[in-house]
Image (spheres, rainbow, N blue to C red):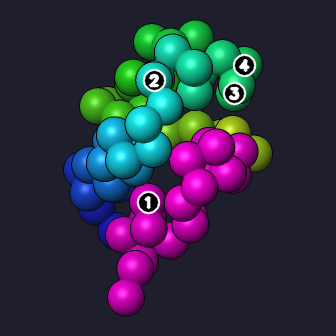
Amino acid sequence: MRYKSMHKNLREAINKSGILQKEIAKRLGINPSTLSKYTRLNIFPALDTFAELCLILDVLADEILGRRE
């Protein structure tokens, strides 16, 4: 699994969701800059935050992790 592809998949999921990053961050209870770091840097959310993020974006974790078939 490559980190760059995970960041890319997360960015794409956010874009497809139509939800502003500011709103996603608010729902997650994190700072918008933290969410931005998840999409650009080698920083990833904690497992519980990742699970909630997938629910908000209505996407399977496997899609973000690059395990889609």
42 shown above or below 34: below
Badge 4 marks a residue whose secondary structure is: loop
Work out whether mark 2 precedes mark 4 in sequence or the reverse, and give the earlier one.
2
Within the magenta stretch, is there residue 64? Answer: yes
Work out whether mark 4 precedes mark 1 in sequence or the reverse, and give the earlier one.
4
Q: Is residue 47 visible?
A: no
Q: Picture coordinates of residue 28 (x, y %)?
A: 69, 27
Instruction: Give the magenta-colored segment's residue range.
Output: 51-69
Q: In this figure, which residue is indicated by the disc labeled 4?
A: 29
Q: Is residue 4 visible?
A: yes
C-alpha separation, residue under disc 4 versus residue under disc 3: 4 Å
Three-letter residue code for mark 3: Leu
The residue carrying pointer 4 sits among few (fewer than 14), some (14 to 19) or many (20 or more) residues within 10 Å by Cα, namely few
Residue 30 in the figure: left or right of residue 14? right
Q: Residue at x 56, y 66 (%)?
A: 60
The residue carrying pointer 2 sits among few (fewer than 14), some (14 to 19) or many (20 or more) residues within 10 Å by Cα, namely few
Badge 2 marks a residue whose secondary structure is: loop
The residue carrying pointer 1 sits among few (fewer than 14), some (14 to 19) or many (20 or more) residues within 10 Å by Cα, namely many
C-alpha separation, residue under disc 4 versus residue under disc 1: 20 Å
Q: In this figure, which residue is indicated by the disc labeled 3?
A: 28
Q: In this figure, which residue is indicated by the disc labeled 1?
A: 64
Q: Residue at x 45, y 23 (%)?
A: 20
C-alpha separation, residue under disc 2 versus residue under disc 3: 13 Å
Kindly indicate whether the residue at mark 1 contacts the one at mark 3 (C-beta within 8 angstroms).
Answer: no
Residue 59 in the figure: left or right of residue 27? left
Three-letter residue code for mark 1: Ile
Quadrant of the snapshot with the N terminus: bottom left
Q: In this figure, which residue is indicated by the disc labeled 2?
A: 20
Badge 1 marks a residue whose secondary structure is: helix
Kindly indicate whether the residue at mark 3 contacts the one at mark 4 (C-beta within 8 angstroms).
Answer: yes
Within the magenta stretch, is there residue 38? Answer: no
Three-letter residue code for mark 2: Leu
